[in-house]
Every structure is written in structure tokens, then in C-alpha cells.
Image (cartoon, rainbow, N blue to C red):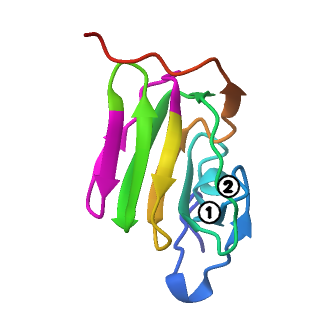
């Protein structure tokens, strides 16, 4: 007998694939399938040899959380400016916030949880600076 929606994902079985950004690899944690698409969760890490580039964009979400497992990553957020996140740091990206990545360490690894599981990403004009 199994419990509907139960999923366990183990590092020993991890499979990373290229995804939304060519310079990252993504490990699906099985949450999208377990929640019927309501939530997606994945571990993201820097891809060896991936050429970094980032354009301002926003995600059409209802919830997005990024937790840094190791290394560092830096974003520029609309109305906030540059925010550097290091291992142990967490950020909630409000729905629709314009942002872009400024850079990351070669060993960066992130946990990202997003609702809905099938969110979309839109390229936008430049990120607006914080008020003076």
C-alpha cells in the first residue's frame, strides 16, 4: 500500500539535467509529480563549462524560495539592488519581481521551491534600481 503524494528523493540516486539556464544543472526532487503540478522543487548547481549570461526576467509564480546549500550567488532585484547569497542564505522572490543573476561560484548549489510547478519565465526590460 502506498500513500498518494508521498515521495522521497535521495542524493545517491541524483540525476542532474540541463534546464532553464544552460549554465546550470537541475535535479528534480519529484515534488511536481507528487503534488499534481502545484509545486516544483529542485536542486540547482553550476554546470561545468556552462557559459554564464543573464538577462533581466521575471517568473509568473505565486511563491518562489531559493536556499543556498553551498557556494554563493548574486542577484540584482528590482527595488533592492544587488543581493549576495552565501551558503545558508535564503531569499523569497515575490511573484513577478524583476531580477537577474550577476554571478555565482563554481561550486554553487541551491534548493529552489516554486508554485505553481509549471511557472513561466518572461524576459523584461532592465531591473529598476532601488529608490535613492
| Above or below, comparing residue 117 to residue 111 in the picture | above
* Mark 1 residue crowding within 10 angstroms, few (<14) / some (14–19) / many (20+): some
Q: Secondary structure at mark 2?
A: helix
Based on the picture, tell me whether residue 95 belongs to the magenta stretch.
yes
Horizontal placement of 54 versus 17: left or right?
A: left
The residue closer to the viewer here, 122 or 114, is 122
The answer to which quarter of the image holds residue 119 is top right
Circles 1 and 2, Cβ within 8 Å, touching? The answer is: yes
The residue closer to the viewer here, 37 or 47, is 47
Q: Secondary structure at mark 1?
A: loop
| Above or below, comparing residue 108 to residue 83 in the picture | below
The answer to which quarter of the image holds residue 129 is top left
The residue where tag 1 is placed is 30
Count how many numbered circles sit on residues in the image: 2
Horizontal and vertical percent for residue 37? 66, 43
Horizontal placement of 78 versus 19: left or right?
A: left
Horizontal and vertical percent for residue 108? 46, 67
Write the residue at 69% across / 26% down: 123
Residue 33 numbered tag: 2
Spatial CA span between label 1 and label 2? 6 Å
Amino acid at each position: 500500500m502506498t500513500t498518494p503524494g508521498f515521495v522521497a528523493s535521495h542524493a545517491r540516486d541524483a540525476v542532474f539535467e540541463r534546464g532553464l539556464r544552460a549554465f546550470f544543472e537541475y535535479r528534480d526532487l519529484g515534488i511536481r509529480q507528487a503534488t499534481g503540478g502545484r509545486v516544483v522543487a529542485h536542486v540547482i548547481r553550476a554546470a561545468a563549462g556552462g557559459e554564464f549570461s543573464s538577462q533581466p526576467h521575471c517568473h509568473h509564480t505565486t511563491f518562489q524560495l531559493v536556499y543556498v546549500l553551498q557556494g554563493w550567488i548574486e542577484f540584482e532585484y528590482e527595488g533592492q539592488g544587488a543581493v549576495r547569497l552565501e551558503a545558508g542564505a535564503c531569499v523569497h522572490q515575490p511573484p513577478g519581481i524583476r531580477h537577474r543573476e550577476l554571478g555565482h561560484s563554481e561550486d554553487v548549489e541551491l534548493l529552489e521551491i516554486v508554485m505553481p510547478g509549471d511557472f513561466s519565465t518572461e524576459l523584461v526590460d532592465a531591473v529598476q534600481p532601488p529608490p535613492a
